[in-house]
């Protein structure tokens, strides 16, 4: 999945697969995680957020099932 680099102290890059509603996040510590059943609106909001990390912590973390990719 293609991910776009983001300027964040916690997140390195973010990608989205709209056909499967999968949000993929690479963390600065190196982990890559995929979050399931994430609406396109949530992806758009995290990409437009002033703080990607704060948006992730408030709206994605603990709200969607995930799996570690590496």
Image (cartoon, rainbow, N blue to C red):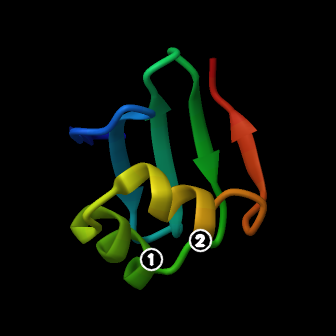
- Tell me if mark 2 has few (under 14), some (14-19) or many (20+) residues whose alpha carbon lies within 10 angstroms of its own: some
Q: Residue at x 52, y 67 (%)?
A: 20
Mark number for residue 11? none
User: x, y percentage for residue 41?
Assistant: 39, 84
| Quarter of the picture holding the C terminus | top right
Q: Is residue 21 left or right of residue 62?
A: left
Question: Which is nearer the eye, 8 or 60?
Answer: 8
Q: Secondary structure at mark 2?
A: helix
Q: Tags 1 and 2 in contact by the CB under 8 Å rule?
A: yes
Q: Residue at x 33, y 57 (%)?
A: 51
Q: Is residue 51 left or right of residue 36?
A: left
As drawn, 23 above or below 26: below
Q: Secondary structure at mark 1?
A: helix
Question: Which is nearer the eye, 24 or 46?
Answer: 46
User: x, y percentage for residue 66?
Assistant: 73, 49
As drawn, 34 above or below 13: below
Label whose residue precedes the other's in the sequence (1 or 2): 1
User: x, y percentage for residue 6?
Assistant: 23, 41
Q: CA distance from mark 1 to mark 2?
A: 8 Å
Identify the residue position indicated by label 1 in the image: 42
As drawn, 13 above or below 51: above
- Tell me if mark 1 has few (under 14), some (14-19) or many (20+) residues whose alpha carbon lies within 10 angstroms of its own: some
Determine which quarter of the picture holds residue 16: bottom left
User: x, y percentage for residue 10?
Assistant: 45, 33
The number of discs equals 2
Q: Residue at x 60, y 37 (%)?
A: 33
Identify the residue position indicated by label 2 in the image: 59
As drawn, 54 above or below 24: below
């Amino acid at each position: 999945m293609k991910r776009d680099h983001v300027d964040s102290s916690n997140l390195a890059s973010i990608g989205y697969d709209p056909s499967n509603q999968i949000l993929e996040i690479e963390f600065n510590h190196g982990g890559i995680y995929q979050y399931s059943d994430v609406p396109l609106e949530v992806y758009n909001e995290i990409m437009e957020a002033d703080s990607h990390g704060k948006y992730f912590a408030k709206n994605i973390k603990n709200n969607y099932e995930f799996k570690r990719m590496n």
